[in-house]
Image (tube, rainbow, N blue to C red):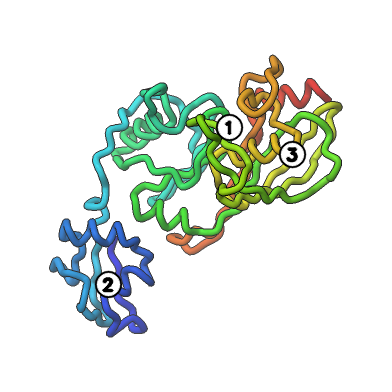
Amino acid sequence: MKYVIPYNYSGRDLQSLLRKELGISKRMLRILKLNKGILLNGKSVPPKNISVKEGDLLELKLDKCETRDLTEPQDIPINVIYEDKYMIVVDKDPHIVVHPTYNYPNGTLANGISYYAKSKGEKYPIRYVNRLDRGTSGLIIIGKNRYYCYQLQKAPMDKNYIALVWGELSSKEGVMDMPIRRKEDSFIEREVGDGGKRAITKYKVLEYLGDMTLLELDLITGRTHQIRVHLKTLGHPVVGDTIYGPDTDLISRPALHSYKLHFYHPLKKEFLKFTAPIHKDMKDLISKVK
């Protein structure tokens, strides 16, 4: 990344400029210093006690911050709906895990994205700006390096979901403000309880469908399983969520879809909005219960 020092930053301490103006994290700054990845007018410099002046060329070797990515490229179809030099936005299919794990060592979204990048002559570690559970479909963002991902994660972002839940909600809209913690003796499950991290979800009824309700949800915070845990606690678990709700043959995964993301792109300096229609299995279920 190259940056020409403007007149209003002339005389600033380089380390202060990196941290406060360019948003370089402490960890990233430490890695850049260790790997001589900070260049001023073509020369590697330690950023502390170095003053910059108008017209200086600052170059950051961001590849020095990257760890080796062991994600194997695999030819897995992915639906890329937007891409620029900083990020890509994918409409994730349900039933696909985002990263390789012990139980899912391959066939993941990360494997598919690695293959997609390789086919375009690119290579970057897969870093997610937002995350989706295996069964959740919809929009997910990948930053193309550590710095880009960090900047995008810091940007305020509206995250909207569609969910089909059991039962008829008595209030047509509301706010669920309940702390979420890891459930004792479970690696996977979460629960509402004292000592948990604050979690806020707004909801609005879109349609009543017999013994189900179609909701729009606005994720204010981003805790693991937040929407699913909040709706369970409210007494209206997501249809198909067999961890937090009853078993059903109506759908083979939680009927939850990330359908809209709206945020200010801090690197392109513009507002972006993305939408993705609900996937076929949810659409078919909604049509069936109407």
The one nearer the camera, 182 or 255, is 182
Q: Looking at the image, which residue is at 32% across and 28% down?
A: 73
Mark positioned earlier in the residue sequence (1 or 3) = 1
The one nearer the camera, 242 or 7, is 242
Q: Is residue 32 left or right of residue 265?
A: left
Question: Of circles 2 and 3, which is in front?
Answer: 3
Residue 136, numbered circle: 1
Q: Are marks 2 and 1 in contact (CB under 8 Å)?
A: no
Q: Amino acid at mark 2?
A: Gln
Mark positioned earlier in the residue sequence (2 or 1) = 2
Residue that mark 3 sits on = 234
Inter-mark Cα distance, 2 to 3: 48 Å
Q: Position of residue 208 (x, y in %)?
A: 84, 34
Residue that mark 2 sits on = 15
- Element marked by disc 1: loop
Q: Residues within 10 Å of mark 1 (few under 14, many from 20)?
A: many
Splitting the image into 4 quarters, where does residue 94 fall? top right
The one nearer the camera, 80 or 93, is 93
Instruction: Note whether residue 59 is visible.
Output: yes
